[in-house]
Image (cartoon, grey):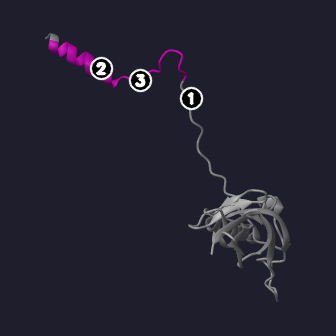
Amino acid sequence: MRTIILSVLMLAACAQPATPASGDIPVAKPPTTTTTTTLSPAAAQIRADLARLDGALRAPGIVAAGLNETADLGSGLTVRPLSVIEDSRCPADVECVWAGRLRLRANVSGQDLEMTLGEPTQTAHGAVTLAVAKPAPFAHWPTEEIGPPPAYRFGFQRS
């Protein structure tokens, strides 16, 4: 008989809802809502291009740096972008006759040099190429939708 009563009490304890420990106040979680913002085609194109360039800056063999930051490519080869001399690249949302170019003044292993996007630069520590530049130029940057253009980031690789 004792066994039956003990079993019934144990089952009853398992069936009761759990109560919070003293001092704990149950908090209801707010329902999760997702806000979807529809971007204009230009803003969507710029976001996609920025994501593509972020991937290119993280690619194997690429070392990234912003202005006045140093990219260490190893074996004494370092690149510190100092200033953008020219960024006449054709905006992605425009048709151009000439593709344009990006020229950068950089300190390469202690020597101030001019670098051009896509062209190797010879140094005493080997050749280095300015391989990636972010952001790409756009004629119409929708600041209200996606904010101002990000600061320049450059990707360098040994060539």
Q: State the residue position of label 1.
A: 27
The three-letter code of the residue at mark 1 reads Val
Q: CA distance from mark 3 to mark 1?
A: 14 Å
Compared across the picture, whether 112 is left or right of 24 comes to: right
Location of mark 2 (residue): 12
Q: Nearer the viewer, mark 3 or mark 2?
A: 3
Sequence-first disc among 3 and 1: 3
Residue at 41% x, 23% y is 18
Mark whose residue sits in front, 2 or 1: 1
Residue at mark 3 to residue at mark 2: CA–CA distance: 12 Å
Name the residue type under label 2.
Ala
Residues rendered magenta in the picture: 3-25
| Secondary structure beneath label 2 | helix
Extreme residue in the left direction: 1
Residue 5: image location, x then y, percent: 20, 13
Q: Position of residue 85 (x, y in %)?
A: 86, 71
Label 3 neighbour load within 10 Å: few <14, some 14-19, many 20+: few
Q: As displayed, is residue 71 above or below residue 52?
A: above
Q: Are marks 2 and 1 in contact (CB under 8 Å)?
A: no
First along the sequence among labels 2 and 1? 2
Report, in whole angstroms, how far the alpha carbon at label 2 lies from the one at label 1.
26 Å
Which residue position is annotated with label 3?
Answer: 18
Q: Nearer the viewer, residue 139 or 122?
A: 122
| Upstream in sequence: badge 3 or badge 2 | 2
